[in-house]
Amino acid sequence: MKETIRVTVGQIGQSGLQQPIYDKEMGLRYTNPKAMWRRALNVFQVAIQDQADFVVFPEITIPESYLWSHIPTISNEHGFIVIGGLEFHTKEQLSGVKYIDNEAFIVVPGDLSEEGTASATTWRIPKLYPAESESDWLQENGYQFHADHRLYIFKSEEYGNWAVLICVDYLNLPLHEILQGRIQTLFIVANNKDLNYYYSMSDSLHRVLFCNIVVCNMSNYGGSHVFTPYRKAHEREVLKIHGNRTDAAVTIELPLQFLKSVQLGRGTRDLAERFKTKPSDYHYRGV
């Protein structure tokens, strides 16, 4: 397991895009996907320069076509895991009702074959519940939200255990109970206006879950942030981006190997004292 992981937080968004941004006749996909992809490329350049292990984008920012045509190649060439939110898209129509999917994706680089080639693996993660404003907006545009109830926890000998949630799913108490004691890092891809609410959640949950928390929010609103359960306050708040309509790409470093040792109750006293005290009911369960 790596001692630390490097994560590039890619806060991009839709500010300045030509209106209309979404195509109502095509499942609310982007009318100008190339413009969004150019913004994503700026983030990849920073991740490559900083030798990141993970690259994270906000909710509904990556056009679906680039998930298949470009991102697996970039992931393989540079060896980082890519996490992000896919643009809205429609998969099915039942009894005349058009359903919209809001999904995150995860692309993991593949191992080299004997021929010297590698093939990345891609997962699509469903958003479990819509925000109330999201549901209302979809209905105004003639669509219904397609709900799902699958939670994925990823296990890696190199990068530890980690999970991905989409925006309002982050506020779901039963999910917190499932994740506590199982992961080292939680990634949230978000399109959230209520910045202080999410700051407060992260400031609490990184202690309750006793893990790294990375929130990548849409640059329309800003507020991307990262917490880790160190004892000293200035170390716990690893990143907080202030200001809206500001695209940013920042690479930060988070503890992994030492964090897991403390989760397991192992390690030296000095190591344990560098981290916050675990919740009294915390038990590491793994995956």
Image: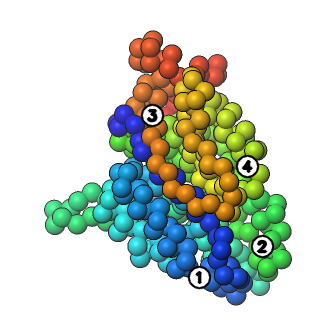
Q: Secondary structure at mark 2?
A: helix
> What kind of residue is marked 3?
Pro
| Chain-order first, disc 1 or disc 4 | 1
> What kind of residue is marked 2?
Leu
> What kind of residue is marked 1?
Asn
Residue occupying the point 44% across, 74% down: 68
Q: Nearer the viewer, mark 4 or mark 3?
A: 4
Q: Which mark is residue 253?
A: none
Q: Which residue is mark 4?
A: 195
Residue occupying the point 62% across, 66% down: 13
Residue occupying the point 47% across, 29% down: 259
Q: In the visual, does 182 lie left or right of 29?
A: left
What quarter of the picture does the N terminus occupy? top left
Q: Which mark is residue 255?
A: 3
Residue occupying the point 21% across, 62% down: 113
Q: What is the C-alpha distance between the residues marked 1 and 2?
A: 20 Å
> What kind of residue is marked 4?
Leu
Binning the other alpha carbons within 10 Å of mark 4 as few (below 14), some (14 to 19) or many (20 upward) gives some
Q: Which residue is mark 1?
A: 32
Q: Nearer the viewer, mark 2 or mark 4?
A: 4
- Which percent across, then down, holds residue 106? 48, 59
Q: What is the C-alpha distance between the residues marked 1 and 4?
A: 27 Å
- Give the quadrant of residue 81: bottom left
Q: Secondary structure at mark 1?
A: loop
Asked whether 185 or 119 is in front, the reply is 185
Q: Is residue 264 above or below residue 105?
A: above
Q: Which mark is residue 138?
A: 2
- Give the quadrant of residue 177: top right
| Chain-order first, disc 2 or disc 4 | 2
